[in-house]
Image (cartoon, rainbow, N blue to C red):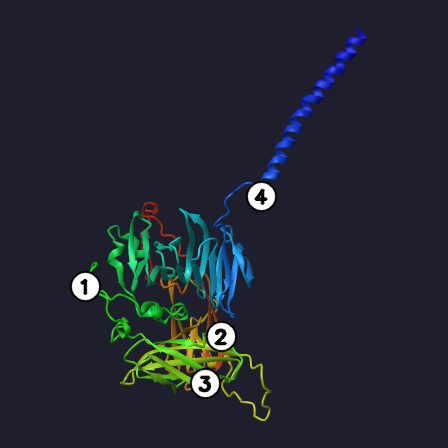
């Protein structure tokens, strides 16, 4: 009996051991198979279009990929961007992006921000969050989301897209593009070459809005942008078909100057050297194109350039580069001496060859360099806290000193040369002020475009308190009602 009990106990113990070991081995086998499936690479999983390749398109470019939150990496050569990355941001110059297995390219201008969304409905999809991009679409395999509509560029098309806080814009330089209304996904509008479409945030509240009714001829503004000039938008438009009337009635005509209305205030484009480019010499030839037949004179830093009306071009030979960083001002005039267009671009020189001429006396700067001579007189606090959506900044300088002023690289057009007072509106509706901390770099330039002084001004924009509902108002309150608001609100 004892033997029997011992044998039963032994077989019971063995049975319990097997009942434990068998599930363990099964789990181990499943784990090994899962690991091999993930890491062996034998499954034919489709990784096509799983990333976007980003690279600088200019030597001076400064671009970043934000991984998550504030974590970012500067891109000096090429880098893959995935949908898990937060955004691509360009601080300086221009970035180029392309995709696996398709030939379409995206060029992101300075201040541009976009996100890679992955492949949606068989199309490479990105979201433009801020500033300007140019898309060269070869096979119509892209989709771009803006805040107010989405865009599908058609085959063999070149378009510029722009996004700010309130407006989404498309400018078609070649081919065409389909624009889709988010609120009416079944409807799409075709925007053709030489046309543009702008949809404001407020437009979307109109349920009867038809996108087609907002299509207009290409504006003169886009022809002055860096993307248009750098990518030779003028030559893209040179084969445009001029439309007579509306609808599909069209006749091909010789375009030439007719691309630009005779009285349009377009201007010129600088083709060489590029803005923010670097040369190794102490002088450079400045060349450009005339975009308006009314132009009779072009000046470079107030010195006249040679104009070729037949070739619609101009050149200034041997422009001297006096400093390592040279701000060059160009102006275009009509026959009456009126300014048709003006602008500024920067050329750097490395001065690698030759020795410095020590026989020349160093120049002496006699301009004041004190805060007292470059004052911000309103608002008086810095930083300035407010809940207002519009803030006017007023300043004061000494007479006969300052040639022009820029705020965050925007040149103040209403400041009179060598004047004394200036002002600037920080406006939430225009995207020049947002909720939170807003930084404004104010630069003062003098003779020969020398930088004289820099002010930093901060506006802390706080959100307005929510209006109290009338239903919650104390009926015994005989003062101001809950629905009342200040004039600033």
Q: CA distance from mark 4 to mark 3?
A: 59 Å
**Which of the 4 image quadrants contains residue 421?**
bottom left
Task: In the rendered view, tell whether residue 465 sits above or below residue 260.
Answer: above
For the point 41% across and 87% down, which residue is it?
400
Quick one: 257 or 7, which is closer to the camera?
A: 257
Pointer 1: what residue? 245
Is the residue 359 above or below the residue 329 in the image?
Answer: below
Residue beneath disc 4: 41
Task: State the residue position of label 3.
Answer: 319
Residue 289, position as x, y percentages in the image: 36, 77
Residue 80 in the figure: left or right of residue 253: right
Relative to 79, does residue 8 appear above or below in the rendering? above
Could you tell me how far apart the alpha carbons at marks 2 and 3 are, in whole angstroms?
Answer: 15 Å
Q: CA distance from mark 4 to mark 1?
A: 60 Å
Foreground label between 4 and 3:
4
User: Sequence-wise, which precedes: disc 4 or disc 3?
Assistant: 4
The residue nearer to you, when weighing 326 against 399, is 326
Tell which tag, 2 or 4, sits nearer the viewer: 4
Q: CA distance from mark 3 to mark 1?
A: 46 Å
- Secondary structure found at label 2: strand
Residue lying furthest top = 1
Choose mark 4 or mark 1, whichever is in front. Answer: 4
Mark 3 or mark 1, earlier in chain: 1
Q: Is there CB contact under 8 Å for labels 2 and 4?
A: no
- Dot 4 falls on a residue whose secondary structure is loop
Callout 3 crowding tier (Cα within 10 Å): few <14, some 14–19, many ≥20: some
Would you say residue 252 is visible in this rendering? yes
The kind of secondary structure element at disc 1 is loop
Q: What's the mark number on residue 277? A: 2
- Residue at the (47%, 59%) spot, across then down: 97
């Amino acid at each position: 009996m004892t033997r029997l009990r011992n044998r039963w106990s032994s077989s019971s113990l063995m049975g319990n051991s097997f009942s434990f070991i068998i599930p363990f081995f099964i789990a181990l086998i499943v784990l090994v198979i899962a690991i091999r499936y993930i890491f062996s690479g034998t499954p034919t999983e489709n990784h096509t279009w799983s990333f976007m390749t980003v690279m600088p398109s200019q030597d001076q470019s400064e671009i970043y990929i934000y991984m998550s939150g504030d974590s970012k990496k500067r891109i000096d050569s090429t880098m893959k961007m995935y949908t898990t990355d937060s955004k691509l941001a360009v601080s300086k110059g221009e970035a180029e992006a392309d995709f696996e297995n398709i030939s379409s390219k995206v060029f992101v201008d300075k201040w541009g921000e976009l996100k890679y969304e992955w492949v949606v409905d068989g199309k490479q999809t990105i979201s433009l969050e801020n500033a300007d991009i140019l898309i060269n679409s070869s096979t119509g395999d892209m989709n771009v989301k803006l805040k107010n509509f989405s865009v599908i560029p058609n085959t063999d098309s070149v378009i510029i897209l722009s996004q700010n806080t309130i407006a989404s814009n498309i400018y078609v330089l070649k081919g065409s593009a389909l624009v889709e209304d988010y609120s009416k996904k079944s409807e799409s509008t075709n925007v053709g070459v030489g046309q543009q479409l702008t949809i404001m945030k407020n437009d979307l509240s109109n349920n009867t809005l038809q996108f087609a009714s907002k299509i207009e001829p290409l504006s003169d503004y886009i022809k002055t942008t860096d993307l248009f000039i750098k990518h030779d938008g003028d030559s893209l438009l040179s084969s445009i078909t001029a439309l007579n009337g509306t609808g599909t009635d069209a006749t091909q005509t010789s375009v030439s100057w007719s691309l630009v209305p005779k009285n349009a205030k377009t201007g010129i484009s600088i083709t060489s050297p590029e803005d923010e480019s670097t040369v190794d010499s102490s002088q450079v030839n400045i060349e450009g194109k005339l975009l308006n037949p009314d132009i009779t004179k072009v000046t470079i830093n107030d010195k006249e350039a040679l104009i070729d009306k037949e070739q619609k071009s101009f050149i200034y030979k041997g422009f001297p580069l006096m400093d390592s960083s040279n701000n060059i001002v160009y102006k275009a005039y009509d026959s009456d001496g009126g300014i048709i267009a003006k602008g500024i671009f920067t050329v750097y020189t490395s001065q690698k060859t030759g020795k410095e001429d020590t026989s020349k006396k160093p120049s002496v700067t006699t301009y004041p360099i004190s805060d007292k001579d470059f004052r911000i007189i309103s608002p008086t606090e810095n930083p300035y806290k407010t809940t207002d959506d519009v803030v006017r900044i007023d300043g004061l300088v000494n007479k006969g000193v300052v040639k022009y002023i820029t705020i965050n690289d925007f040149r103040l057009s209403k400041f009179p040369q060598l004047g004394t007072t200036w002002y600037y509106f920080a406006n939430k509706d225009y995207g020049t002020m947002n909720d939170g901390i807003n930084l404004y770099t104010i630069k003062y330039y003098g003779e020969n475009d020398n930088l004289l002084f820099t002010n930093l001004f901060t506006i802390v924009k706080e959100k307005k308190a929510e209006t109290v509902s009338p239903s919650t108002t104390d009926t015994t309150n005989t003062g101001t009602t809950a629905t009342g608001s200040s004039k600033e609100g």
